[in-house]
Amino acid sequence: MLNFNFQNSTHIHFGSEQIQVIKTEIPSNAKVLVVYGGGSIKKNGVYEQVSEALNEHIWFEFSGIEPNPTYSTLMKAQEIIKNESIDYILAVGGGSVVDGAKFIAAAALYQGDDPWNILAKQEAVSKALPLSAVLTLPATGSESNGNSVVTRDGNKLPFSSPLVRPLFAVLDPSVTLSLSDRQISNGVVDAFVHIMEQYLTYDVNGKVQDRFSEGLLQTLIEEGPKALQAETKEDLDIRANIMWSATMALNGLIGSGVPQDWSTHMIGHELTGEFNIDHARTLSIVLPAVMKVRKEQKREKLLQYAARVWQINSGNEDERINQAIKLTEQFFIQMQVPTRLSDVDLSESDIDLLIDRLANHGMTSLGEHGDITLEISREILTTAL
Ligand code: NZQ
Ligand code: ZN
């Protein structure tokens, strides 16, 4: 196992009727900015629950954070923060809203020339307003990590800081009942790929991390499809297992002390930036191709994945690996997400553009060995056609 530091300080409040804890969790003298997206929280009762819980606080609101939050929208929140002396941010929504709130919190106390540098130049965040989250879409893990992804002019860039990790997060599975099938699918697949990118590398004898990852993958394989089926769609236990899996997938635990390979995400970000494809749907297209192209480098872990996650124990090594990749693709298809570039109407002629974008963003040595060059990214995209 590799050396690691691990601290996850986000206080999780999990279960039904937990939204009311924000009343006591947010300091009573705080001036709160509630930030949210396009209005789903006004249709499913979450906005009312938050308003009710904050009835003794001084609070303001900022809405309109879009999926794949944009820099220009997020910067608009700075005015109200200054004018009203806001000193606490509460994000209410999915990963985009939570990510957006993180950037708003960091930009509010930014002291350099241009807050865009936090993303473009990866300037370290030295101060940020405190923030917490009421999560409405299980997917990103943003509710208990320090990561955020912001888009400007089609450039989708990540930043990370422990200072923007939510202080607490409310996870009430019942609020996910209003999600569309598309958002349920996206969430399950995003979480699945987060686990894979921390698991499918090379063996460092990180048994705890591996077994946690395999358990989470199996949970998503078992429960994900049920959340799409009419008979089981409303089952709160299924929603709870998906929600907790998505948080555990990217709260730092399973990635501590093991190599990681975020190439699927980095290539996927270019597909979203250029063609506006939903985040998770880029991942379901890229991951199977990464598994195929990096078969030799990932051989040992692919065999472990085949045996422990899919119970494939017969056949020679190549047959077992190929079967595991096939079952992964079938799981994605069952979750109603695309697995090929052609499924989203892209073809070979689009690959040059994606490679240029990877080059412009410095994504020239991806993967657990840093050896996924632009040439190999091209091979991955070609395999995904
Ligand atoms: O904006 P509203 O009206 O709230 O609607 C949203 C949005 O249209 C809707 N929604 C959310 N909760 C709902 C709901 N609709 C009905 N009922 C509910 N309970 O769902 C739509 C999509 O929301 P979004 O927040 O964009 O989805 P998601 O949670 O998948 O977040 C995606 C973003 O997170 C980033 C992605 O790049 C993307 O920008 N990521 C963040 C990560 C992190 N912070 O660690 C890691 C991820 O890999 C990912 O990159
Ligand atoms: Zn993701």
Image (spheres, rainbow, N blue to C red):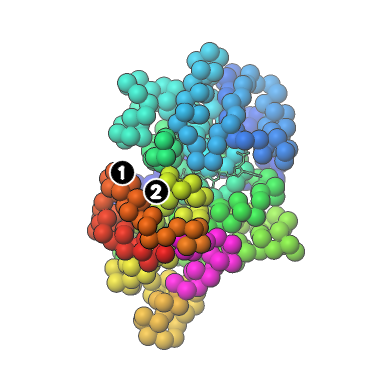
**Residue 211 falls in which quadrant of the image?**
bottom left
Question: Which residue is at the far right?
Answer: 231
Which quarter shows the C terminus?
bottom left
Task: Please report the residue visible at 45 percent of the width from the left and 78 percent of the height from the top.
Answer: 323
**Amino acid at pointer 1:** His
Q: Main secondary structure of the magenta part?
A: helix
335 falls in the magenta region = yes
- Between discs 1 and 2, the one toward the N terminus: 2
Residue 143 location (% of width, % of height): 52, 42
Which quarter shows the N terminus?
bottom left
- The residue labelled by disc 2 is 270
Q: Which mark is residue 361?
A: 1
**Amino acid at pointer 2:** Glu
Residue 169 location (% of width, % of height): 56, 39
Q: Distance from label 1 to label 2 (Cα)?
A: 9 Å
Which residue occupies the foreground of this view, 240 or 287?
287
